[in-house]
Amino acid sequence: MMWGYSWVAQSPDGGFFLGIAYGPNANESNDARFALPAFDRLFERRAVLPDGPEREALMREGKNLLVAHMPYKVHVHTILNDLLQPRVRGWWRHPFGRDTWVYTGVDLETSA
């Protein structure tokens, strides 16, 4: 049986997406109940490393294991387009936040 999920990154760290396949997370975020000891060891080693080439290599290796075993199939990448008028001030799309209009205003002097 297959069904769809929608996951959105909450931070620039890709570790979240690896965590949904981490064996001990079964019954929580690991809905596929994927269990692969080699992946779990990579995930645990990655968690204690600082950002850098070694951590990135572990994440890439973990991703390759997930692609090979396919507990989840990624099939959609959201693309957002924004169209603004020149009089809009203060607008900036945060790469992970959803409140894009919180600090947005309109310059009334240039509004016609």
Image (spheres, rainbow, N blue to C red):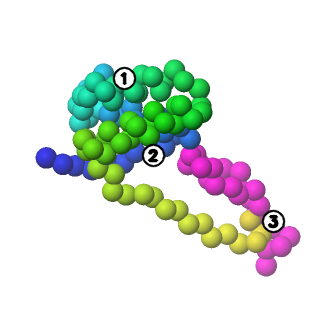
Q: How many neighbours does mark 2 have within 10 angstroms: few (below 14), some (14-19), or many (20 or more)?
A: few
Q: Amino acid at mark 2?
A: Val
- Residue 8: x percent and y percent? 45, 46
Q: Amino acid at mark 3?
A: Asp
Q: Residue at horizontal 30%, vertical 22%? A: 24
Given residues 97 and 71, the one toward you in this image is 71
Label number found at residue 2:
none
**Label 3 belongs to which residue?**
107
Distance of mark 1 from mark 3, alpha carbons? 54 Å
> In percent of the image, x 81 and y 68: which residue is there?
108
Tag 3 or tag 2, which sits nearer the N-term?
2
**Contact check, label 1 and label 2, Cβ < 8 Å:** no
Work out how far the residue at label 2 is from the one at label 3, CA to CA, in angstroms.
Answer: 33 Å
Q: Which residue is mark 1?
A: 41
The residue that mark 2 highlights is: 8
Tell me if mark 3 has few (under 14), some (14-19) or many (20+) residues whose alpha carbon lies within 10 angstroms of its own.
few
Q: What are the residue bounds of the magenta stretch?
A: 89-112
